[in-house]
Image (cartoon, rainbow, N blue to C red):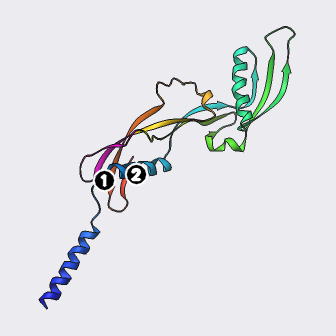
Amino acid sequence: MKKITTYILSLLIIGIAGCKTKTTINQDQAGEVIIDYLKANPEYKTTRFNFGEIKFNSTNDMFELGKYKTLASKGLVALNLKEAKKKFLSKDSSFVYQITLTEKASPLVLKQDKNKATVKVLEYALSDEKPVNFEQVNSSTAKVTVSLKMVTTDFEPFDKDANKNSNFITKTYKLKLSKDEGWKVQP
């Protein structure tokens, strides 16, 4: 009888110890948690994009028209010339285009109004070259610093704040251990 009681007690202790959540995390696991988080909550930079009926006059406007023509060649917008006024021997010609977004642009369009849209100009992805640096603060929290590389989109030429001093950013995330879900990024 004593043997059976010892056997049941040892099974019970092993069962309780097996149900205990894992409280330590290593570099690879922290990287996987960040990858999962970035899939659900991508990091990106946006800008406002004008479309609809737009008039191009000066040589500066012609540079802007070139950006739209590049998007049209990639199938992201459709350009329809509505009106062209060419002045003889003058640089002051004017062109009016009807610019419409196509279905191909929809993954990059976040918000669309009547004549403006908020579009992604840069997306950030986890860099393969720089490892994940993490520091476990205590048994239930950790700080993870990762390098995110910039991936430009086709709308990147429309970014008005295009001062890029580097092609990556570093970002620190705080991880918290949840009894139900394991390690998760704390917003």
Asked if residue 108 lies left or right of residue 8, the reply is right
- The residue type indicated by label 2 comes to Val
* Dot 2 alpha-carbon crowd within 10 angstroms: few under 14, some 14 to 19, many 20 or more: some
Residue at screen point 32% across, 61% down: 179
The answer to whether residue 158 is above or below residue 30 is: above
Q: Dot 2: what SS?
A: helix
Residue at screen point 73% across, 19% down: 62
Instruction: In this rendered view, identify the residue nearer to me: 55 or 134.
Output: 134
- Contact between labelled residues 2 and 1, with CB atoms less than 8 Å apart: yes
Q: Dot 1: what SS?
A: loop
Looking at marks 1 and 2 on the same chain, the residue that comes earlier in the sequence is marked by: 1
Q: Which residue is mark 1?
A: 25
Q: Which residue is mark 2?
A: 33
- The residue type indicated by label 1 comes to Ile
Membership of 12 in magenta stretch: no
Q: Read off the magenta span.
A: 130-145
Asked if residue 75 lies left or right of residue 151, the reply is right
Membership of 144 in magenta stretch: yes
The answer to whether residue 9 is above or below residue 141 is: below
Asked if residue 106 lies left or right of residue 34, the reply is right
